[in-house]
Image (cartoon, coloured by chain):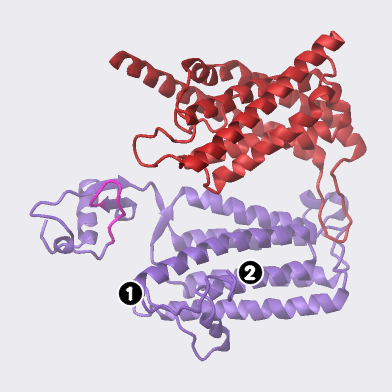
Chain colours: A purple, B red
Amino acid sequence: VEPNATIREIRLMFHKLYPRWYPARQSIKLDPKGKSLRDEEILQHLPVGTTATLYFKDLGPQIGWTTVFLIEYTGPLFIYFLFYFRMPFVYGLDERFTSSPHPVVNLACICHSFHYIKRLIETVFVHRFSHGTMPLRNIVKNCLYYWGFAAWLAYYINHPLYTPPSYGKKQINFAVIMFLLCEAGNFSIHVALSDLRRNGSKTRKIPYPTKNPFTWLFFFVSCPNYTYEVGTWISFTVMTQCVPVGLFTLLCFIQMTIWAKDKHCTYLREFKDYPSLRMPIIPFLL
Amino acid sequence: MAASGSGSSRADNGYGSQQPRRRKGPGALATAYLVIYNVVMTAGWLVIAVGLVRAYLAKGSYHSLYYSIEKPLKFFQTGALLEEYLLIAKYLPGIVPSSVVLTAFQVMSRVFLTWAVTHSVKEVQNEDSVLLFVVAWTITEIIRYSFYTFSLLNHLPYLIKWARYTLFIVLYPMGVSGELLTIYAALPFVRQSGLYSISLPNKYNFSFDYYTFLILVMISYIPIFPQLYFHMLHQRRKVLSHTEEHKKSE
């Protein structure tokens, strides 16, 4: 192996020797307990002598992030329709294919579908992933979570005995406006983040507010995309006034707070001049 | 999920006070608090044990002994929640992450059985199955807490260590049987009274059927109980053979 070989080249060589372990599945480290080396690292820049010992770990079957997202998000989209159109096996034969007298139920279907269609579009056209793949078993876990919750909340919203929100049109309209604003915000952030990596580079850069007012949340928060996402689901909860939606929102909030805190810590570690006013997910608070 | 074994991965010696490798043991003040806590818990469960024996001798039969120890049982079992919180918040040192999940399961299931089943469904309080798990829990907890007490004081009699890692073989299935039978006995009463259940329509658009929930809980024992049991068996082999080696090398 040449001294100026990159880890990526080593991975390809390894793959030729052992066809079973394609590069994405290889974790190559200097130390059995250490972190995996990145593709771009060059052998001679690493702390090794004239001979280097590299440790290999099999990460298990991998699946691309884009594929995962596409499967994860298409599921809820179609599962919701099963309940919206009241398939016979859902609410019983008597209620099959009936429709709800409440306009908010139609609205909820539109919003829910819009949300997942938007996510699918972003996955294909907007997102740039730093890791190419994730372990295969994650997809089972993730799909169970997304699909399961979609089914659970769709069940109640489209139920024949559904009760519309207590404050009627005022509550619904307010919620719809908040929903659209948060979706727009979330989309703006995704575009802004994707622009940071326009030339296909994988290095991290600090995101800054742009001319788009939705991105001004970057002044206060490291991960405004998560902030807006939570906002979207809160709006949806208010719109439907449904406890399962509220529970889903809570879980999303918890999960995204964990991710935001991680991201925030990573930013703080990597950049000495990181803006100090920023909090991970909620301005000034969390 | 009863019987001995909550927090089994807490090394041989309780709160890591003798761990050779990474974590240093708790400081003197923390040790004092922990010793007091464990002594109190041991005493509490002894009270329950004594209460059971006295009630049995007084009544001459083992039916309806639940009432004689109801209050201390609730108190001390719920006290274990505090212990679990301390574990999770990492105020208790030397704990392996996986054991937190296992002990969390145990504590949650015990508290669930104490409050959400036995306390809530009054009709099952006379059942023999209640006695079954109460006895299993009592013996387990007395041994467990005295184990921790002695370990903290660095003076662990082999008998207690042996008891902790051996008696569970019988006590664990005993406790689980008692728990399952109790839940099963509660089912018809829950169905009848609609306990803790809410149905549509309601303004929060939510429904919950406690009866189905209890059945799901019973089913969940099937994957979880064997895992905990074999984990304890594994721990047993590790701990007791380790002691053998120590003895041989002396």
Which label sits in the foreground, 1 or 2? Answer: 2
Instruction: Determine if residue B217 is in view.
Output: no
Q: Determine the residue positioned at 61% across, 74% down.
A: A228
For label 2, the SS is helix
Q: Could you tell me residue B82's position as x and y percent? A: 64, 42
Towards the viewer: A227 or A236: A227
Local crowd at mark 2 within 10 Å, few (<14), some, or many (≥20)?
Answer: many
Chain for mark 2? Answer: A
**From the image, which quarter does the N terminus of chain A lie in?**
bottom left
Towards the viewer: B171 or B154: B154
Q: Could you tell me residue A40's position as x and y percent? A: 25, 66
Left or right, A83 with reference to A133: right
Q: Determine the residue positioned at 38% across, 66% down.
A: A130
- Which residue is denoted by mark 1 in the rendering? A201
Left or right, B109 with reference to A156: left
- Position of A137 relative to A245 (above/below): above
Where residue B149 sits, quadrant-wise, is top right
- Which residue is denoted by mark 2 in the rendering? A230
Towards the viewer: A101 or A243: A243
Question: Magenta span covers which residues?
Answer: A29-38
Instruction: Determine if residue B195 is in view.
Output: yes
The amino acid at mark 2 is: Val
Q: Could you tell me residue A7's position as x and y percent? A: 22, 59
The amino acid at mark 1 is: Ser
Residue B179 - label: none
Q: Name, please, the residue furthest toward the left.
A: A50
Q: Determine the residue positioned at 74% across, 67% down.
A: A237
Is residue A112 magenta-colored? no
